[in-house]
Image (cartoon, rainbow, N blue to C red):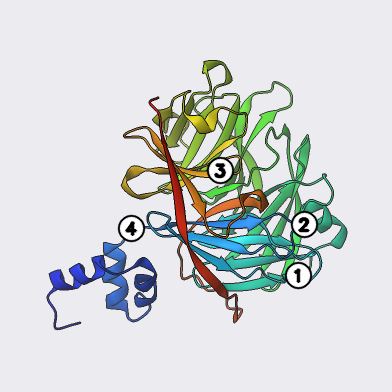
Amino acid sequence: MSSLPEEIIMEIITRLPRRSLFRFKCVSKPWFKVISERESPANNLLLAGDKHLVRTPLFSVEGTSFDETVEIENPKKNHHHKAAVALGCCNGIVCLGQTYSVCLLNPSTKEYKIVDGFDKEEFVHMIGFNKKFNVYGFGYDQTNKYYKLVQFGWRISDQAIVYSLNMDTCSKIFVKIGPYNFSNRDQLGIYIGDAIHWIVRRNFDSTVVIICFDMKENAFREMLPPVAGHTNTLGVLEEKLCFLCRYKYRGGIIDIWVMKTYNISDSWYKLFSIGKNVPPFTTNHPTRVLCFAQSGKVVLRHGKKLLVYDPKDETFTYMNYKGVCWNFIKSIVPYVASPVPLKSGTYLRSVRTSEKVTQKRRREV
């Protein structure tokens, strides 16, 4: 490789699949530098099943056009009530909740680590067998160098439990918040800017705000959204906080906003709008922004549907994959391919790969 001209090396790199590039970055520092400068961040999706479906596998949707699905072995799938429930993602590491434990998984390398030490009664509440705790958030504490998992009740929460996932065990503290109401109890916290974010309503005036858990300070603060509609959800687009707002009294029109400079409320700007006549948005199911696809397209989740929206010609592509039963999919978590090691030495198996089956619908907005 060292004897080849740089333009030839770049031409070879552009023709390689992303999975091969991911492996080749580990060969040497020069290869890592060349490939990192050339490639753009790849968005992937992890599909996790319902908590009661013990043998439901995990699916990783990969590729710039999301045309490849890899079935991943479900951790502890042969144990009763050990199904994995996705609780959040941070730096390419997905947090999966299991009875009495948490599983940290790197879907790119298939390495995983089980973290024990949770209080059994509290953790049964957390993964949903009791409705007391339903809202989660997962992030990384840059100062102390370990992951944190946040949980609290979705109705009139006044305190949160923060678990520090250090090494193979966890510790916990209680942090006062609110009180707030969560209009959408199934929302997962969005990690960006060293904080985890959720959309809530203040109890005393019903104002819609974004609450942020600061990983360093172990404290909550508020952030103002650009607008507020009938349903509101958060996401991340190109490493920026994204706010999706749907208006009930404007025919279901959806606006997607992006915060240009983090934690600066005046930096919100509207990315684009989706018109009222688009088929997937004729119901009251919440719509979430997951990530960007190729050519400026946006991957959305609406109810149990996964689809790609093209703002240029205002069309949708429904995403269906062989072997994936959407009725059993509980959560869809976007992640970026990352070589971050968990230092556990345990790995899951990639069972098989299936092709995408797409269905297109076009309608003017």
How far is the residue under mark 4 from the one under mark 3?
Answer: 27 Å
Could you say whether the residue bearing mark 1 is in a helix, strand or loop?
loop
Q: Earlier in the sequence, mark 4 or mark 3?
A: 4
Q: Earlier in the sequence, mark 3 or mark 1?
A: 1
Could you say whether the residue bearing mark 2 is in a helix, strand or loop?
loop
The numbered dot on residue 52 is 2
The numbered dot on residue 165 is none
Q: Residue at x 52, y 24 (%)?
A: 227
Q: Residue at x 58, y 20 (%)?
A: 248
Dot in front, 1 or 2:
2
Question: Which amino acid type is shown beneath numbered disc 1?
Answer: Asp
How far is the residue under mark 4 from the one under mark 1?
Answer: 36 Å
How far is the residue under mark 2 from the one under mark 4?
Answer: 37 Å
Q: Position of residue 49 (x, y in %)?
A: 66, 56
118 to 277, vertically: above or below: below
Which residue is denoted by mark 1 in the rendering? 116
108 to 133, vertically: above or below: below
Could you say whether the residue bearing mark 4 is in a helix, strand or loop?
loop
Which residue is denoted by mark 4 in the rendering? 40
Dot in front, 4 or 3:
3
Give yes or no for contact between labels 4 and 3 (Cβ–Cβ under 8 Å). Answer: no
- Frontmost residue, 194 versus 355: 355
